[in-house]
Image (tube, rainbow, N blue to C red):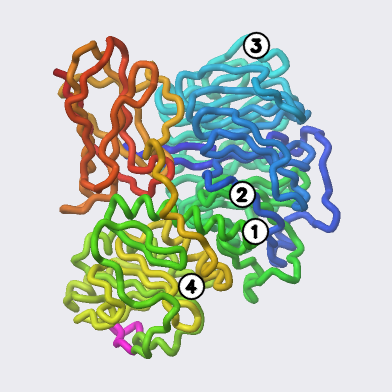
Amino acid sequence: MKHLKSSGLICIFLIVFSAVSAASGAPRMQSAGRVPITAENISAGLAEIATFEHGGDEVFALAFSPDGQRIATGASDGRIRLWDTSGENLDPVLSWPAHDLEIYALAFAPDGLRLASTGWDGWLRVWELPTPGPWPVFKYLLGEPGYSLAYSPDGLWLALGTGYAANRLLLWPAQDIQFSTQVLRSHYDWVTEIVFSADSTALMSASADGSIREWTLDDTEPFRVLSGHAAPVSSALFSPDGSVIASSGLDGAIRLWDATSGQPLRVIKTGYVSQIAYSPDGSVIAAGARDGKVTFWSPLTGEELGTIQAHYPWVNGIAFSPDGTLLATTGEDGTAKLWGIPVPASTRADPVGGTEITSPSQSGNDAEIKAQMELDALKIHLHNTRSGDLTVWAGGTLGTYLDVKPTWPLFSALPDTALPGLGTEYAGFNLNEFERPTLVNFWASWCGPCVQEFPLLTEVAADPAQHAYDVVFVNSWDEKGPALEFLLNQPEGLNVAVDPEGALLNTLGSIAIPTSVLLDADHRVIAIHVGNYTSVQAALFERLAQNPDLYTTVKDVTAQPAPDHFVEIGSVDLAQAVRITSDERLRGALSGENWLTTYQFEGHAGDVVTVRLEALPVRMNTYSLEPYVILLTPDGRYLAESSDYLYEPFAQIQHITLPEDGLYGVIATRYMGAEGISQGEYSLRLTVQ
């Protein structure tokens, strides 16, 4: 996998590939009843064969075993899981705690007898297979997070790329890994991927510094640097025959290069790609993106071959099986999925493109879907109790400290309603014309949270075939001029109606915007969210719309006790933390994956410490980060935390007396940590008296 750092923000992307090239000679499994995924037959459509749930933990790392009979996944809980690729067993074959924090990369040795792992905790660990014990056969402390891994096809070398500080490329002799480590002078930013040449004599590395570098194994300087991406490179790999290099970047382009000369061959303009993978026959490049889609391209012609909705919202990882009959993907939704051809009769298909239409809730049995609904609801509840937002659904009222609960009863149909369109593109809102579940979003141009949530809603609205509900926007309590001006900067074709006096919102009994109301196909209200619509609400509402026979039987999650700590950070190595001194003001950023930063300072018994963490505004008086700060003792225990019950654009710990001399830690994070849904820039100040 890969993490990309750009403009002070750390963006995390997954890049994992099969550890075995086509030339490695490893045994391959040909699955009965499956055919390879190629440019010729991909139009038949890919079916979802299996979904592997990870208990809500985001799945970052992914690798196929050399025989194709297993996939290994690494998640935010630090566990490695092995899964059977037959699709007959949805439980992990093996699962064990491998790291203290997120696992970012996995790689099988070509003989399948070892599995290497690395992640945010800064360790490389190597495990014996098929039955790993409680301890790895080898471990190495990197001193910074590990982001990419690869075994050479001949099995003689193991390579690892790091980031955050030194951005190194490290090599070990895999047959005697205890022996020595070779460090190459690598990149100026995160090493996002490593791949060996088919003959194992050279390797290629990609980086957030925007470059791709090629190395021989006996030299510490690259023999060639490929430059062409205008932003961090998120993925790079050789074609199966070794003649072409394919790369993707945050500039929205897939670039193809001649592997012999390094000359550019083709540029495929696409979207924000997190990872690409070559089919073993070389006829297809699969590209995973942040909107949850996987798009298939012909590297020979640059033609788009098809698209599937794999995850929601992010695709973190993507890889073809060694025999090309399976595609594995992982996502932010906490799942790994297997896809294949032909499409079973039960799969709904797009009559034009022949690709599957799916959503997060289509997979799994009823109990699994309900459990995922309840997990999403718990996340929303904890967020709402802090932010003052509110969500009502079949499982009850999800948190709020404000009296804003809408009065319209759930499961009651709205009265027939018609509203004029805003502008000329949309004829108007007519409730009787809604033929499937619809999300009605009430907004205004002057409303900061409305502006903040608009991009997520427009992504859903722009591609209704890939979602279980349509989106209609109702401009309320606003003036026509500013509303139209705001829409000039939004995608075309949105369904926008106008209700200047908020009559429909008043009917619902809501007194605040933004408010988002989910209607089923019979125009009954099945959920209402008052406040900022985030990816967590979107995931829950998607499942509600897709499963009308299940959501009325879910349980109330609000009775669950609050956790001991509202942010679980795992183990922290304070020696590797960023140094901070008294009265120094530092700036940083937190995102969906990079949700904490660790600082350290030298403290003495009797010192009185105050820490203040402030969210920086994204616009005037509008904040996207819910800051949270933790003070750690020298042995890593929680000494103090900021308040958890009320959202303010700052978090602070005041007048804490230090109990002993030592190296103390300060954690700048967000409310709910890894489970949180806020992100943004911050300012941190430590005062020691």
The magenta-colored residue range is 418-426
Give the quarter of the image for residue 485: bottom left
Tell me the amino acid under the disc marked 1.
Gly
The disc, 2 or 4, on the residue closer to the chain's N-terminal end is 2
Q: Nearer the viewer, mark 1 or mark 3?
A: 1
The disc, 1 or 2, on the residue closer to the chain's N-terminal end is 2
Q: CA distance from mark 3 to mark 4?
A: 55 Å
Question: Which secondary structure class fits the magenta region best?
Answer: loop
- Lateral position of residue 160 relative to residue 325, left or right: left
Under tag 1, what secondary structure?
loop
Does the magenta segment cover residue 420?
A: yes
Q: Nearer the viewer, mark 2 or mark 4?
A: 2
The percent position of residue 340, horizontal first and vertical second, equals 72, 57
Residue picked out by circle 1: 364
Q: CA distance from mark 2 to mark 4?
A: 24 Å
Tell me the amino acid under the disc marked 4.
Tyr
Q: Nearer the viewer, mark 3 or mark 4?
A: 4
The disc, 3 or 2, on the residue closer to the chain's N-terminal end is 2
Are circles 2 and 4 on residues that touch, CB within 8 Å?
A: no
Q: CA distance from mark 1 to mark 2?
A: 9 Å
- Lateral position of residue 398 relative to residue 21, left or right: left
Residue picked out by circle 3: 178
Q: Nearer the viewer, mark 3 or mark 2?
A: 2
Are circles 1 and 2 on residues that touch, CB within 8 Å?
A: yes
Residue furthest to the right in view is: 32
Residue picked out by circle 4: 469
